[in-house]
Image (spheres, helix red, strand yellow):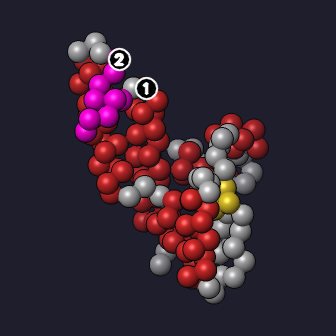
Amino acid sequence: MSIATRFTMTFAAVAGLAFSTAEAGQSMAAAEIEETFRGITLDGVYNDIKNEQGFAEACTQGLELGFDGKTLIHPSQVEPCNATFGPDERELEFAARVLEAWKEAEAEGKGVVTVDGRMVENLHVENARRLLAEAEAIARLEAATPA
């Protein structure tokens, strides 16, 4: 599988779009990609694919500068990039608590709720859903990618 196809499939998986490998790169319209990823900013490539520490540092720097991810050029960069930019267990546990609390609040007719002392509203619920979907997409991709 080409890197371009894997790249397209990765974005599709994160976005929750379904299409087969054969259709990748052909059936996905550029407008659909643009609409799906509007507002997502990716840090540029890191060309020294043999320098794992340098790549990890570049990922950390990108995260600190506010990027949502990094443009990858080699399969060896996927795991460390996901480790830096992907959600951690603490974030996922909080997101799950947000969704559970929100579900209960909605059943009671409330528009806001507190979770761990924090006020939660629609924006936070959408962020929690996105975070959990991102983690699910990463897990699906990791399970489908040969070692």
Taking the image as drawn, is residue 8 in sight?
A: no
Query: Is 17 displayed left or right of 71 in the figure?
Result: left
* Magenta residues, dominant SS class: strand
Identify which amino acid the numbered label 2 is placed on.
Gly
Query: x and y percent of residue 105 in the render?
Result: 26, 21
Which residue position is annotated with label 2? 111
Determine the residue positioned at 72% across, 41% down.
Answer: 34
Q: Mark 2–mark 1 contact, CB under 8 Å? A: yes
Query: Magenta segment range?
Result: 111-120
Instruction: Indicate the quadrant where residue 127 lies.
Output: top left
Above or below 17: residue 45: below
Real-space CA distance between mark 2 and mark 1, rounded to the nearest whole angstrom: 8 Å
Q: Which mark is residue 122?
A: 1
Determine the residue positioned at 76% across, 44% down.
Answer: 30
Q: Quadrant of the N terminus?
A: bottom right
Instruction: Indicate the quadrant where residue 99 lies.
Output: top left
**Mark 2 crowd level (few <14, some 14–19, many ≥20, 10 Å Cα):** few
Identify which amino acid the numbered label 1 is placed on.
Asn
